[in-house]
Image (cartoon, rainbow, N blue to C red):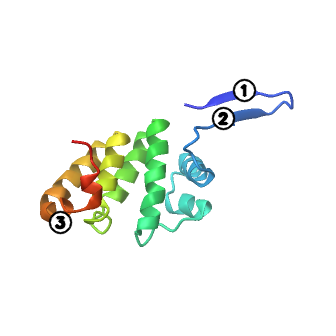
């Protein structure tokens, strides 16, 4: 998950995965210690409400971190946030479902499948859909 080692300076140094950005890690730590999401996002410099695609990108990064560190409650929160209808658009649905699949987020994956079913004609015409493996 993360590698920790005591260095000659007497401090404990933690090596985090390369994909983990400082703002994302700040959010995860604040959430772990306080349980808050809006306050954790503010600490990371992100506004979660109203939902925006910029916020959704950040929550996708948090979802990946939550999956990596096995934080199931935080994963569920991320899935619920990303499953909002205003974020599951024709343009974003393929990116979100592939991220859900990669992060082992079955609730979000199933919501995306349902939304793709409703928007099938439009989704099948997107470049993102064309790039999916067979």
Measured from the top left, where is residue 46 in percent x and y? 54, 65
Residue at the image position 66 percent from the left and 35 percent from the top: 15
Measured from the top left, where is residue 20 in percent x and y? 56, 45
Residue at the image position 18 percent from the left and 57 percent from the top: 116
Whichever of callouts 2 and 3 sits on the residue coming sooner in the sequence is: 2
* Horizontal side of residue 25 vs 88, given as left or right: right
Residue that mark 3 sits on = 122
- Callout 1 touching callout 3 (CB < 8 Å): no
Whichever of callouts 1 and 3 sits on the residue coming sooner in the sequence is: 1
Residue that mark 2 sits on = 15
Image quadrant where one finds the N terminus: top right
Measured from the top left, where is residue 5 in percent x and y? 72, 26
Q: Nearer the viewer, residue 26 or 128?
A: 128
- Callout 2 touching callout 1 (CB < 8 Å): yes
Front position among marks 1 and 3: 3
* Horizontal side of residue 15 vs 60, given as left or right: right
Residue that mark 1 sits on = 5
């Amino acid at each position: 998950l993360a590698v920790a080692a005591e260095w000659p300076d007497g401090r404990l140094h933690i090596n985090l995965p390369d994909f983990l950005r400082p703002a994302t890690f700040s959010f995860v730590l604040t959430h772990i210690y306080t349980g808050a999401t809006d306050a954790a996002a503010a600490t990371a410099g992100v506004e979660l409400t109203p939902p925006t695609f910029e916020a959704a990108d950040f929550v996708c990064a948090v979802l990946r971190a939550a999956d990596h560190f096995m934080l199931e409650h935080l994963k569920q929160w991320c899935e619920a946030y990303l499953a909002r209808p205003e974020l599951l658009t024709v343009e974003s649905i393929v990116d979100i479902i592939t991220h859900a699949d990669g992060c082992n987020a079955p609730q979000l994956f199933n919501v995306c499948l349902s939304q793709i079913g409703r928007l099938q004609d439009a989704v099948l015409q997107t470049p993102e859909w064309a790039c999916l493996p067979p």
